Amino acid sequence: MVNVGIIGFGYWGPNLVRNFNLATNCRVVAVADPRPERLMNMSKLYANIKGYKDANSLIYSKDIDAVIIATPVSTHFQLAELALMQGKHVLLEKPMTSSIEEAEILINLAREKNLLLMVDHTFLYTGAVTKMKQLIDSGELGSIKYLDSTRINLGLFQPDINVLWDLAPHDISILNYLIDEQAYSVNATGITHTSNEMENIAYLTVNYKSGFIAHFSCSWTSPVKLRTMLIGGDQKMILYNDLEPTEKVKIYDSGYKHSRLQDKNSILVDYRIGDIHVPKLNTNEALLEMANDFILCIINNKEPKSSSNLGLAVIKILEASNKSIKHNGCEVLLNALVPEENHVPAPILTN
């Protein structure tokens, strides 16, 4: 039995408590939150769970084997580092940390301590993403050419991170899970309509040497909520709509072929429009699947689906996007990210 402590009982914390209570070989024994009203609400729902006003008290508790951190991203590194130093396994909410350097320090520390460090990229455990992974790996879609994601809504403006850091981690984690090739560079543009200089609308393009391309559109200022992703192969294509209650994934047997004409600047395109197939998906709650993965990987000393290395890959793209936005969309090479004295990466910028 793995005894778990959860730090943060705000928006996401109650969902974590509920699902980890249902997870196999797991027991939630403590929750920490500095707000008394939150702890009072938690106690009404779970009389057997101990409440802490101070996160450090939970981390130092000898009754706890693993710590789950659901707090603002600016606090992730300090809390996770302390928990690992105290011999606790750690699960971090997305995004993993505020910087590449912080993520790498935690990964190395977890490795030294032989502890599990994992990031809660919940979407990797959904039936929709699992099915898309199966379709891509089986070759049914053919060669994958592009991924286009839209995640917009009239949402909560975050005080410490921009819209890409808030919304894009979901879809970047899906991208990195579905596509084996490593990203080469990014371009990003964005704008802020507030006084805190945090972009509330942003567009991110992730480039690959093979010619595959991924694009992300994120906004807190849309009158409608959209959660869609298009994945295009040269044989078939996928539309993933997370807001669709039942038919979240649709497979389009559509495509095109092209050939050059005598004029080398002209091409002839032949389009193919075929059937649409809606596959059956696993309907288990993704958060419970994630909780079970975390606990079972602790028990069996295995690598989880949403590993810390995947979390680091997401941070690398996000940190590069910051650089690109501040340099008017210039291309930022991901393999050129190196820490400066102030811990801000200094990538090579190419026009």
Image (tube, rainbow, N blue to C red):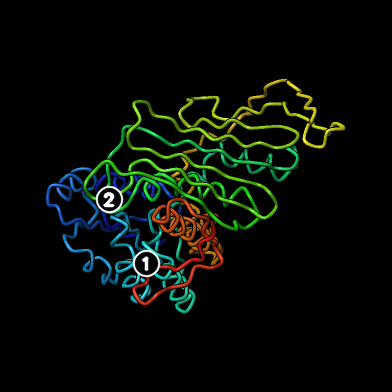
Type of the residue with mark 1: Asp
Q: Which mark is residue 65?
A: 1
Q: Residue furthest left?
A: 36
Q: Residue furthest right?
A: 262
Q: Nearer the viewer, residue 70 or 166?
A: 166
Instruction: Give the residue drawn at x 63%, y 25%.
Output: 278
Q: Nearer the viewer, residue 47 or 270?
A: 270
Earlier residue among tags 2 and 1: 1
Q: Which residue is mark 2?
A: 197
175 with respect to 95 (left or right): right
**Where 88 falls versus 307 (above or below)?**
below
Instruction: Give the residue drawn at x 37%, y 26%.
Output: 224
Q: Position of residue 203 (x, y in %)?
A: 45, 43
**Where 43 falls versus 345 (above or below)?**
above
324 with respect to 42 (left or right): right
Type of the residue with mark 2: Glu
Q: Position of residue 115 (x, y in %)?
A: 45, 71
Q: Alpha-carbon neighbours of circle 2 within 10 Å: few (<14), some, or many (≥20)?
A: few
Instruction: Give the residue drawn at x 66%, y 28%.
Output: 251
Q: Position of residue 70 (x, y in %)?
A: 31, 54
Q: Secondary structure at mark 1?
A: loop
